[in-house]
């Protein structure tokens, strides 16, 4: 009689969920060989201990910029092992937008015990140089989402980093990779990036649907039982995702399709599973819709995304609690219950969420259940976080 429990833990399709997480670093970046070759050409002389290199990488959302920078740093380290020791330091400037935060991240990655406070930027740079030369390590600094630093700091730190060896005997302290979505750069920030020089600017093209299909294939091969995801399904995912050209959409569509098929107890994913969530999964939600929302509406939406990544629905009561958690994270005082409702209505009107009234099993009255049938919560979450950091 307990046969109905058989499917639990059976993993009929999913072998390993890890490759379906956005943070998973794949061994290979699918279809980006020419970009990797360009990077290698820019870093051609990096085996010489006196040399530092620099590159600016730009491209649209989900074009693989962050992953490319990680993979290149990893491959370079392996390639030069025994010749030149590379210490890569990754800083996401969205989370660390100020000059002092960035410097602190660099210095503590070289020396975990470096004191937090009490030094000016000149002194910290000096100590970074010393540490690097003492340990005979070349620093490869990756400043991701660098537009946040440029906005906060007007490029000041970047100039200091570029000139770190100026007037010194020793050279080759630090190479720089700066990374940004191109459309978020305004003219000032664009000008700072163009200082790197045309030849050191790598633009990542948008993914076509065929490239997105190949990314879907990579993740399906890594995560799923052989033969469980057909060519037709992979193609469909590539086509759906090509509206945004965002590789995260590929991963999320695949994940939700796999889950849908597993819930139905099947051993293979069918094309209709790609539409599992509803009508328009993966439709383009214009970034401007999210950007134009007010601060608190964005925080409500973020709260919803976080829950709806894992659950199909959330009650309004839970949503309000989750909104309070987001407010705490962004150090904002939550708005009243009535205002919270008003924001929910706005999100509903914009078709970002849908509400249905259902009866609650315990307690009195009816409760509302919220879902996100027309967008991908994980992709949306990332977009809202981007928008929130611009306030
Ligand atoms: N060519 C690729 N091959 C395999 N996986 C990829 C590829 N491009 C992107 N991905 C995957 O898609 C997701 C998004 O990629 P990534 O974070 O590098 O994009 P991004 O350009 O940095 O986006 P954003 O502009 O939002 O910062 C990651 O999980 C990454 O592993
Ligand atoms: Mg990125």
Image: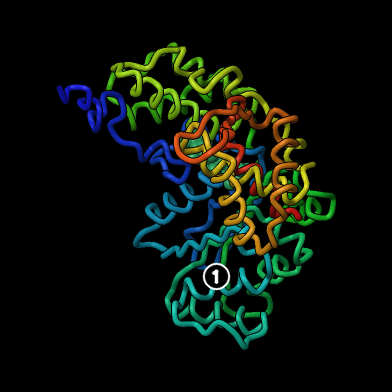
Residue drawn 45% across the image and 34% down it: 361
Q: Nearer the viewer, residue 13 or 138?
A: 13
SS class, disc 1: helix
Q: Is residue 207 above or below residue 76?
A: above
Residue drawn 76% across the image and 51% down it: 194
Q: Nearer the viewer, residue 262 or 123?
A: 262
Residue drawn 83% across the image and 55% down it: 188
Residue at the spot of label 1 = 105
Which image quadrant is residue 10 in? Answer: top left
Q: Is any atom of residue 65 visible in this view? A: no
Measuring from the top left, give residue 373's x and y in whole percent: 58, 25
Residue drawn 48% across the image and 48% down it: 72
Q: Is residue 361 above or below residue 129?
A: above
- Residue 203 falls left or right of residue 77: right
Instruction: Please tell me how many numbered marks the rendered image carries.
Output: 1
Q: Is any atom of residue 246 visible in this view? A: yes
Q: Nearer the viewer, residue 290 or 33?
A: 290
Measuring from the top left, give residue 352's x and y in whole percent: 67, 31
Measuring from the top left, give residue 217's x and y in whole percent: 41, 24
Q: Is residue 323 above or below residue 16?
A: below
Which image quadrant is residue 324 in? Answer: bottom right
* Quarter of the image that includes the C terminus: bottom right
């Amino acid at each position: 009689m307990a046969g109905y429990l058989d499917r639990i833990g059976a993993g009929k399709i999913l072998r390993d969920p890890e490759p379906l997480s956005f943070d998973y670093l794949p061994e290979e970046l699918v279809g980006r060989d020419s970009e990797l070759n360009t990077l290698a050409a820019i870093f051609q002389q990096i085996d010489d201990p006196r040399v530092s290199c620099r590159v600016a990488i730009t491209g649209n959302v989900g074009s693989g910029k962050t992953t490319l920078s990680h993979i290149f740093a990893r491959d370079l380290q392996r390639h030069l092992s025994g010749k030149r020791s590379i210490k890569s330091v990754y800083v996401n400037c969205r989370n660390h937008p100020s000059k002092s935060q960035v410097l602190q991240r660099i210095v503590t990655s070289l020396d975990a015990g470096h004191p937090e406070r009490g030094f000016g930027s000149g002194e910290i740079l000096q100590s970074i140089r010393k540490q690097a030369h003492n340990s005979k390590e070349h620093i490869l600094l990756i400043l991701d989402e660098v537009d946040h630093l440029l906005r906060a700091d007007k490029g000041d730190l970047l100039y200091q980093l570029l000139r770190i060896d100026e007037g010194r005997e020793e050279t080759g302290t630090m190479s720089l990779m700066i990374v940004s979505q191109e459309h978020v750069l305004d003219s000032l920030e664009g000008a700072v990036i163009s200082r790197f020089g045309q030849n050191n600017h790598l633009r990542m093209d948008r993914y076509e649907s065929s490239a997105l299909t190949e990314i879907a294939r990579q993740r399906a091969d890594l995560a799923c039982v052989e033969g469980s995801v057909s060519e037709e399904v992979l193609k469909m995912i590539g086509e759906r995702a090509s509206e945004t050209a965002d590789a995260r959409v590929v991963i999320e569509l695949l994940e939700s399709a796999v889950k849908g098929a597993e819930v139905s107890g099947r051993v293979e994913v069918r094309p209709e599973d790609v539409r599992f969530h509803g009508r328009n999964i993966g439709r383009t939600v214009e970034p401007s819709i999210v950007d134009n929302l007010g601060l608190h509406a964005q925080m409500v939406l973020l709260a919803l995304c976080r829950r709806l990544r894992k659950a199909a629905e959330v009650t309004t009561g839970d949503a309000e609690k989750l909104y309070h958690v987001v407010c705490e994270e962004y150090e904002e005082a939550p708005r009243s219950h009535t205002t919270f409702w008003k924001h929910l209505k706005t999100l509903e009107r914009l078709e970002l969420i849908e509400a249905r009234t259902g009866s609650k099993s315990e307690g009195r009255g009816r409760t509302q259940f919220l879902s996100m049938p027309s967008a991908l919560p994980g992709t949306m979450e990332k977009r809202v976080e981007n928008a929130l950091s611009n306030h």
